[in-house]
Image (cartoon, rainbow, N blue to C red):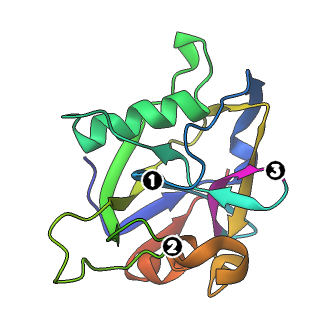
Amino acid sequence: MVSSAVVNTYPLSSYTFGAKEPKMEKDTSVADRLARMKVQEHNHPHILLLQIGNTFCKLPGGRLKPGENEIDGLKRKLSSKLAANSPGLEPDWQIGECVATWWRPNFETIMYPYCPPHITKPKECKKLFIVHLSEKEYFAVPKNLKLLAVPLFELYDNVQRYGPVISTIPQQLSRFQFNMIQS
């Protein structure tokens, strides 16, 4: 696991994007593991989001298998959602620190940035990790999804469009220094 208060971001133009077979969502409303991937365009950090249909956006990630380590599970889910089917193009996922933990105490849709004290067995725990990307990568996105690079200023306080978890990413990242690397 990589831990640093400095995050290198590379231009979006450094990355190559392709398509692969559609990936069906097991449960489009609940995901236990999320990742945060950053690129930059116009010297401003962007977050890579997957768009389902025309309105719903989510971070790449998903559920862990029982007993699976969260870092290994995150790498597995990132590869299944974004890696090409060719072993030579498999990204070397560098998982950074956990920057946020959200809790769903019951079957309602609301999530909290803390586990309420009266809850002994929460329904879901959602963690957001920084994923450090190398300078060049090839991403293969399932045909039924769209990969968007969304600037932090668009996410900020935009709960209506991105929901309460994704819209707080700019605040979660405020403790990091971004090193904007130009090609």
Identify the disc placed on residue 34: 1
Q: Which residue is mark 2?
A: 165
Q: CA distance from mark 1 to mark 2?
A: 10 Å
Q: Residue at x 26, y 65 (%)?
A: 122
Of the residues under marks 3 and 2, which one precedes in the sequence?
Answer: 3
Name which residue type carries label 1.
Leu
Secondary-structure class at tag 1: strand
Query: Image height check: is 86 above or below 153?
Result: above
Mark 2 nearby-residue class (10 Å; few <14, some 14–19, many ≥20): some
Q: Can you identify the residue that label 3 sits on?
A: 53
Mark 3 → mark 2, Cα distance in angstroms: 19 Å
Magenta-colored span: 45-53
Locate residue 159, reporting x and y percent: 64, 82
Mark 1 vs 2: CB contact within 8 A: yes
Q: Give the answer, above or below, for where 38 lies relative to 79.
A: below
Residue 172, relative to residue 99: is it above or below?
below
Residue 177 in the image: state x and y as whole percent.
Answer: 43, 75
Pointer 1 or 2: first along the chain: 1
Q: Nearer the viewer, residue 150 or 59?
A: 59
**Which comes sooner in the sequence, label 1 or label 3?**
1
In the rendered image, residue 52 lying in the magenta stretch gets the answer: yes
Q: Is residue 111 left or right of residue 4?
A: right
Q: Residue 143 falls in which quadrant of the image?
A: top right
Residue at 46% in and 53% down? 35
Residue ID at (43%, 74%) = 111
Is disc 3 surrounded by few (<14), some (14 to 19) or many (20+) residues within 10 Å? Answer: few
What's under tag 3, amino acid-wise?
Gly
The image quadrant that residue 82 belongs to is: top right
Q: Which amino acid, mark 2?
A: Val
